[in-house]
Image: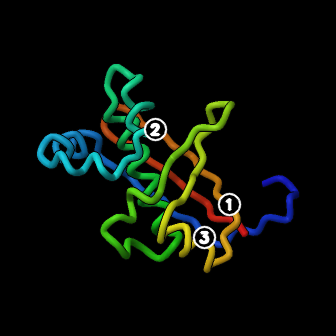
Amino acid sequence: MTDTGAVPVAVGTDLVEIERLRAALDRTPGLHGAFTSDELDYARTASDPVPRLAARWAAKEAVLKCLGGIVGRDDLAEVEVVRGSDGAPGIRLHGSVARRAAERRIAGWLISLSHERSVAAATVLAIR
């Protein structure tokens, strides 16, 4: 970390089996509601959007682990993986999840996403 005075307060990591998510998305159309329209649009720019969605699902789970876990049924939809102007991933929170982060005085997030043939992964560091 650079010398910004930021203090890490929590770390979360998650793995998602890509084919398992593909099957869940096919079986449960409402599952797409866990993703924002921007996340879906970005994923659809790839020939196969599911690996990108799996990485974002892993990131959402990792963020929620930093905040103590899933509390409400809309928690996954309230965690958004965004892309910076340089293409680097970032986190934007909405609704009750944003309030939980504010209560814990989380000022920002560091995130790393990865995927390969069968699995997607995310590691998230909450900073104060």
Q: Position of residue 30 (x, y in %)?
A: 21, 50
The residue tagged 3 is 10
SS state under label 2: helix
Asked whether, in this view, residue 29 is left or right of residue 85, the answer is left
N-terminal of the pair, mark 3 or mark 2, is: 3
Residue linked to disc 1: 108
Q: Nearer the viewer, residue 20 or 60?
A: 60
The residues tagged by marks 1 and 2 sit, at their Cα atoms, a distance apart of 20 Å
In what element is the residue under mark 1? strand
Mark 1 or mark 2: name the one nearer the start of the chain. 2
Picture quarter with the C terminus: bottom right
Q: Is residue 42 above or below residue 24?
A: above
- The three-letter code of the residue at mark 2 reads Asp
> Which residue occupies 36% across, 43% down?
54
Q: Amino acid at mark 1?
A: Gly
Q: Residue 38: which disc?
A: 2
Mark-to-mark CA distance, 3 and 2 = 26 Å
Q: Is residue 70 above or below residue 85?
A: below
Mark 3 and 1 residues: CB-CB less than 8 Å, in contact? no
Element type at mark 3: strand
Q: Quadrant of residue 50?
A: top left
